Amino acid sequence: MDLDEKIKLVGRHFSPDEAIISGGLASYLNTNIVRNTDDVDLIVVSSEDLGDKKYNFQLETQIHIDLTQADYVFDSIDISNPELQIRAIKIKEYESGEKVSYLGPEALIATKLTCFCVSNIDGQPTEYGINVLRDRDLQDIRNLQKITLDEELMYDILGTVRQLEEVEDVSIFWEIAKRVLVERNAGISFKKSAFGIARFLATIPEEHREEQYQSLRDTSEEMQTGPFAIYVQKEKFLNAYEFQ
């Protein structure tokens, strides 16, 4: 099914005030780059009659819906604050009348980068709680980064992520993550572990960061994605106090 037709179906069943589009459809709405997306990811804004609407949508379209709450979007960001939500979402209205709300690029990148629920799928097994970017999420982030981003909004959104509570300055986390994602001298294991690397390096003193960055980059060349992500979590982040 054409992605715009799928989005229009969402607009016919849910108002922009009831549910926000996330995931692959939101990536498409932001970038206009088509990619395969089977399910519809929606963030609940208003729960009134949403269960019935989800059932009717799935019955009519045979498309599965994944619902998540605004205060913990797929185990990641919190956009339940009305002011932040207004800044984080965008509205699309089709000429045929359908109107939908969807995550803007900042919120979508933050969700994909920090979400823990992507572990142990798509043949990329890791232990629970270890974040590894899937191929499609890594590509989505790269495409979204081509958009001019509101850096202050990015910091505000990242500041709501529970997994970053140990990070005092999320702007440092984001700068490191951006560097990891575009690192030319590293393999895929390094880039898919952008969250873990950035979180670890953002929690240690600045004078140790470059040395540890280079060390992790070198180590990633010797390990597959899953084991390397676990290494970053267990051997580095959990022992970050050694660098204090």
Image (tube, rainbow, N blue to C red):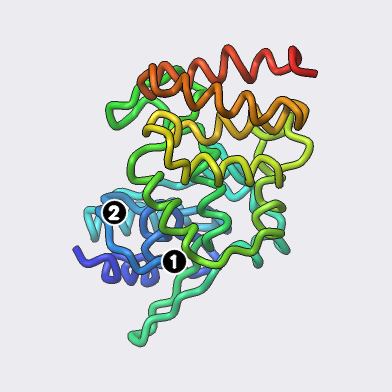
Q: Left or right: where does residue 240 sit relative to residue 60?
A: right
Quarter residue 28 falls in: bottom left
Calculate the distance from the C-alpha at mark 2 to the C-alpha at mark 1: 25 Å
Q: Earlier in the sequence, mark 2 or mark 1?
A: 1
Say which of 37 and 109 sits in front: 109
Q: Is residue 149 above or below residue 182?
A: below
Badge number at residue 30: 1
Residue at image point 29% right, 54% down = 58
Q: Quadrant of the N terminus?
A: bottom left
The amino acid on which the numbered mark 2 sits, given as a three-letter code, is Gln
The amino acid on which the numbered mark 1 sits, given as a three-letter code, is Asn
Residue at image point 50% right, 66% down = 147
Secondary structure under tag 1 reads helix
- Mark whose residue sits in front, 2 or 1: 1
Q: Quadrant of the C terminus?
A: top right
Q: Left or right: where does residue 39 sit relative to residue 43?
A: left
